[in-house]
Structure formats: structure tokens, C-alpha cells
Image (spheres, rainbow, N blue to C red):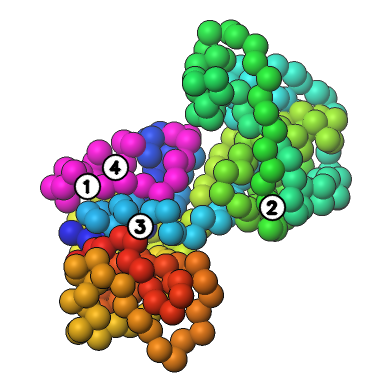
Amino acid sequence: MFGVLNINKPRGMTSHDVVGVLRKILNTKQIGHTGTLDPFAEGVLPICIGKATRLIEYFDNNKEYLATVQFGSSTDTYDLEGKILKTSSKKVKSEEIESALKDFEGEIEQTPPIYSAIKLGGKKLYEYARKGETVTVPKRKVTIYNIKLINFDETNQQAEILISCSQGTYIRSIANDLGENLGCYAHLIKLVRTQSGKFRIETAINLDDENIKDKIQNPLSAISLEKITVDEAQHKRISHGMPVRIDGKELKSGEFLILVYNNSIDAIGVYNDGEIKVKKVFI
């Protein structure tokens, strides 16, 4: 098998759990996901099958999330599964939230939650947290392409916020920081990934879908690299890992490309000095 699945990960499962289920359904060990979702989160989880696992690094990595934020308290995990640290009786209004969200637009610095899998000093942050050890979590730069308030329940102080962002963005941190900025504290109570690269929630497949094998997609649809169609002679050269020349195309030196034969990926190549050198072969 050689393809991708757009899986709708259910709440309560780890991304690794989803891979385990699919290994049994598809009867193959060569499966991987393109980006971890927290167990309490749900939504789009692209899955690569067979040799398509070698394509993961070329997938589009931008994400979109629908986050539900609870104002009035903060937790040590920045979400509903953590221990409450601070509370506030302050009530916020939608206008205040919309104004505060503007501070998160563009490139920002954020501090990841201590309960995360980021490694520091050879250990994952959550390992320090579970032992009660205090560490300084380094800030990281991420990009928020769009962030807007979709709905606000003023009575229950819950907001639905749509966030389009770069890979590596912690939505939990945005919820926590938003509460701090508004002076009322906040944490995340629900998270749905609505998009990952070219995959949307509207076309995501549930794990209990009886026809899941029939919904494996051609990985060509998931990658935005320029596609170069090759002929039979070039196809044979690629199968031996040999470079090919492409005429009539203006390509940039160092540009990565997909070499396609009969609507199937032959290889990933890189253009230099008038020819495309093969980096990964899939024939």
C-alpha cells in the first residue's frame, strides 16, 4: 500500500493509538502520522501508509484549529485536564476578547506548556513536571496567520476561537496567555484540528468507517511541491537512482520536485545545474 488517509481522530485517543488501530485494519506495519494531536484533542490527523511515510517531511505543515477557551481559571497544563492554579471572578465581554486577540496575530513568541513533549536537556518537559522539578521553558517563535472569535457564551464565559497557524504552535499556550492578557485567567476545554496542510475536517474519515481501505488517497494530492511528469525512458533512469534532465521548465537551483509517471510518484528530486538528482525513489 502507498497512500494517505485523512483520519478524524476521536477525543481520548493518542495519535499513536490511531496508528495502532490502522495497522490492524490495513494489515501493515509501515504507517505513520504527520503531527501529534493531544489525547483530549480531536480532528484532522493525516496518516501515511507504506512508502508514503517517507514523504511526511514534504507535506504542508500549516494548521487550523477551533479552540474552546474557558475564562475564569488557569491550570498547570493549560487545559481542562490540569490542576487549577488561579481563579478570577472578572467577567469579560466579546469586544475585549476580539481586541486582545489582535496581539496574537503574525509572528509571536510563546512559551510551550510544561506538560508537553518538547525535549530539554535530554528529557521531555512533562517528565520534569511530573517530578515537580522547576525548569525554564524556552520561548519559541510561531506564526499566527489568522485568529478570530467565532462565538462567545458570555454567561458561561466560554469562547470559540478559530486559529490558523504554523506548525509547532501550542493552542493551549494561546488560551493561557489570552487569559493572562485579559486579567481573568483561562484554559483550553476543547480543541478540534479543522485542517492540516491540504486535509480538511469536512472530508476526514472516522476510524470505524467500514470502507476505510477504499478511501486511501494518492499522496500526490497532499504535497504542494511542483510536479514534473517524466516519460518511460526517464522513469527507467529514476528506478536506478539516476538523474534526469528536464527541458522547457524554469526551475530554481536547490528546488525540490515530485517526479511523476502514470499519475504515481516515482521520486522526490532536487534541481541543480540543469538536471534533477533523485533523493528518494518510490518505484
Residue position marked by numbered label 3 in the rendering: 55
Q: Earlier in the sequence, mark 2 or mark 4?
A: 4
Q: Nearer the viewer, mark 3 or mark 2?
A: 3
- The reply to whether callout 2 and callout 1 are in contact (CB within 8 Å) is no
Q: Please, what secondary structure does the residue beneath circle 1 have?
A: loop
Residue position marked by numbered label 1 in the rendering: 30
- The reply to whether callout 3 and callout 4 are in contact (CB within 8 Å) is no
State whether residue 87 appears in this view: yes
Q: Amino acid at mark 2?
A: Ile
Residue 86 quadrant = top right
Q: Amino acid at mark 1?
A: Gln
Compute the Cα span from label 3 to label 4: 17 Å
| Left or right: 153, with 129 as reference point | right
Packing grade of label 4 (10 A; few <14, some 14-19, many >=20) is some
Q: Nearer the viewer, mark 2 or mark 1?
A: 1
Residue position marked by numbered label 2 in the rendering: 144
Out of 171 and 203, give the one closest to the viewer: 171
Compute the Cα span from label 2 to label 1: 33 Å
Vertical arrangement, residue 245 with respect to residue 183, above or below: below
Which x, y percent locates residue 279?
Answer: 34, 61
Compute the Cα span from label 3 to label 2: 25 Å
Compute the Cα span from label 1 to label 4: 10 Å
Q: Earlier in the sequence, mark 1 or mark 3?
A: 1
- The reply to whether callout 2 and callout 4 are in contact (CB within 8 Å) is no
Q: Please, what secondary structure does the residue beneath circle 2 have?
A: strand
State whether residue 156 appears in this view: no
- Residue at figure coordinates x 69%, y 43% from the top left: 141
Which x, y percent locates residue 239?
Answer: 19, 69
Numbered range of the magenta stretch:
16-40
